[in-house]
Amino acid sequence: MLKFYGYKKCSTCRKAEQFLQQTGINYEFIDITENPPCGEELTAIVARADVPLHKFFNTSGVQYRELKIKQRLPALSHREIVALLASNGRLIKRPLITDGKRVTVGFDAEQLAAVWS
């Protein structure tokens, strides 16, 4: 079963949920702000994703700006970035969807259809 890390108040997450529901795809919703993936799980997710690590950041989020992540990012190691993301679910781009083998980050209807249908 898919793990859908999202946030109920996020319009992008609602669109992705609606897409999955309309296509009959079952998933487990996990509130990313309350239960972000742990460092170990996030490391596995990042390894399976076909996107660069910096694309896992919610760059439009308040936390991203407040913590000045853009300025700090070049000096952080891979391990430090994963630990930072795992420590604060609001920093992670939503939705983050995985089945343990495949991963999608963010909402793109064509990508979701290609990966999850």
Image (cartoon, rainbow, N blue to C red):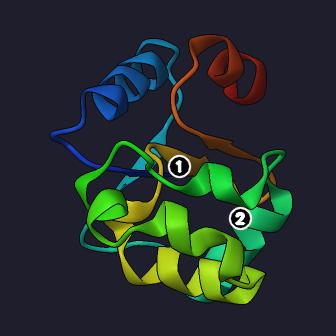
Image spot of residue 100 (x, y percent):
73, 61
Q: Report the front residue among 21 and 73.
A: 73
Q: Residue furthest left?
A: 9
- Label 1 neighbourhood size at 10 Å, few (<14), some (14-19), many (20+)? many
Alpha carbon separation for disc pair 1 and 2: 9 Å
Q: Secondary structure at mark 2?
A: helix
Query: Is 92 above or below relative to 111?
Result: below
Please tell me which residue is depicted at 71% across the width and 88% down the height of the picture.
79
Q: Which mark is residue 9?
A: none
Q: Report the front residue among 63 and 10.
A: 63
Horizontal side, residue 11 vs residue 111: left or right: left
Image spot of residue 101 (x, y percent):
81, 56
Quadrant including the C terminus? top right
Q: Which residue is mark 1?
A: 96
Q: Which residue is mark 2?
A: 45
Horizontal side, residue 31 vs residue 28: left or right: left
Q: Is residue 98 visible?
A: no
Q: Which quadrant of the structure image shows residue 15?
A: top left
Please tell me which residue is depicted at 46% across the width and 59% down the height of the picture.
92
